[in-house]
Amino acid sequence: MSLHPASVTLERLAVGDLSAQASDDTSKHVDACPQCQHFLAELAEATSSCLRSVPPKRVLDAVSDARGRHARLMRWTQLSVAGALAALVLILVSPWATAPVRLKGIGLSVQRKRGNEVRTMDSGTGIRAGDALRMVVTLSKPSSVSIWSIDAQGRVDRLGPPGGISLGVGEHAFPESAIVESPCVDLWLVLMTGAKAEQQLIDATREAAEKRIVPGEAWVPSGALVKSFRCEP
Amino acid sequence: MTDAEVGEAYRRYGGLVLRRCQRILRDRAAAEDALQDVFVRLWRYGDAFREAESKVLWLYRVADRCCFDRLARRGAQAEISFADQSSALVDETSQSKTVEDRDVVMCFLDRFDDRVKQVAVLHYLDEMTQEEIAAATGWSRQTVFKKLAFLRDRAAALRMRLCGGAG
């Protein structure tokens, strides 16, 4: 083991990120160590070189772009929610809506439980280790439903029993939740219906792994419903 | 987080973050792009940054994630770049006659899964001990030990492939 402080300790010392005690101890070593002094001098040069090559304005412009994209996304989300609510009200109160409402297609919404907080996931909601993800499946006809998780390391896990779960028309809480492991890795939840779903998914993921495709939506067979979740930093 | 806070954090920590991204990605332009990603995430998750005991370690974890994402996207080209990287490394070797584990591992970082990448960065760049890596990642020492052993084996195999056993 080196007698010098770890490089990350010196880097933290350089920007005042160490505790008082650790800072004192490390400074004492540096005062007597030409090698560490040289390291810190090079670090100072690298830092000022960075500010010259990537001026703060460039970074702030990138932040500003991201803020604009986020604001547009939020506006679209709000508009979509408002539109959906308006459509729902119209359906419920319109005099000609005498026939029962029929659901079309398959829906999957995911709720994140973190401590005592439960939140419906959207594109901006992240995950972290320990989160429980609960799936709510909406069906327009009775089907056998299977859900899998695929993580960024290529691990594929089935949620629920082999062969899927038979569910009727309507909204159902899927009986099994996914728990985000530690450390958190990005993951994708994949919903498929039908008796051949499992084999299709196995074939698709195996083929993707053999082709060394990066795990993600590209691993999912066509026709499946996918929700992606990114880890919070 | 306000622009002023992001700007202040950048002036203070930007150099460290860029240096780290460059060492992981081994590409200046890609590192500058990753640097911007890091500070966009800082703006977005500013509360977590404020609460972090160590700002540097928080930024480093974000930087690692941004770089690993870029390495993964680059992964599809790994076979093509392998030849380029190999020749660059061998050229260096011919001068120094030694290829360190760190150089080999960092050169081929995109070939490992994210957990191994994380251990590699903490061990070879941050020079953390097994205990420190276990504390930083929340993994057991046994897991860290196994991943380090795997990295050393892979480094030895790659060295053999590149240099025919030299170093």
Image: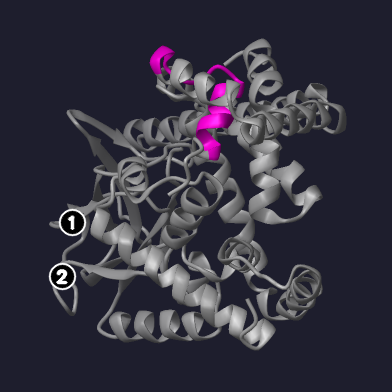
In the picture, measured across the screen, residue B30 lies left or right of residue B143, that is: right
Q: Quadrant of residue A116?
A: top left
Q: CA distance from mark 1 to mark 2?
A: 9 Å
Q: Which residues are drawn in magenta?
A: A7-21
Pointer 2 residue: A165
Q: Could you tell me which residue is drawn at 57 percent across and 25 percent down?
A: A30
Q: Closer to the camera, A26 or B113?
A: A26
Q: Closer to the camera, A63 or B10?
A: B10
Pointer 1 residue: A174
* Badge 2: residue crowd in 10 Å (few <14, some 14–19, many ≥20): some
- Callout 2 secondary element: strand
- Residue B27 seen anywhere in this rendered image of the structure: yes
Residue B15 percent location from the top left of the image: 71, 31
Residue A185 percent location from the top left of the image: 40, 53
- Callout 1 secondary element: loop
* Badge 1: residue crowd in 10 Å (few <14, some 14–19, many ≥20): many
Q: Closer to the camera, B115 or A229?
A: B115
Tell me, yes or no, whether the highlighted magenta stretch contains residue A10.
yes
Q: Is residue A64 above or below residue A7?
A: above
| Three-letter amino acid code at the position of disc 2 | Ile
Q: Could you tell me which residue is drawn at 71 percent across and 19 percent down?
A: B11
Q: Could you tell me which residue is drawn at 58 percent across and 30 percent down?
A: A11
Q: Is residue A49 above or below residue A122?
A: above
- Mark 1–mark 2 CB contact (< 8 Å): yes
Q: Is residue A208 above or below residue A90?
A: below
**Which label is found at residue A114?**
none
In the picture, measured across the screen, residue A119 lies left or right of residue A185, that is: left
Residue A14 percent location from the top left of the image: 61, 23
Q: Is residue B58 above or below residue A203?
A: above
Q: Residue furthest right?
A: A52
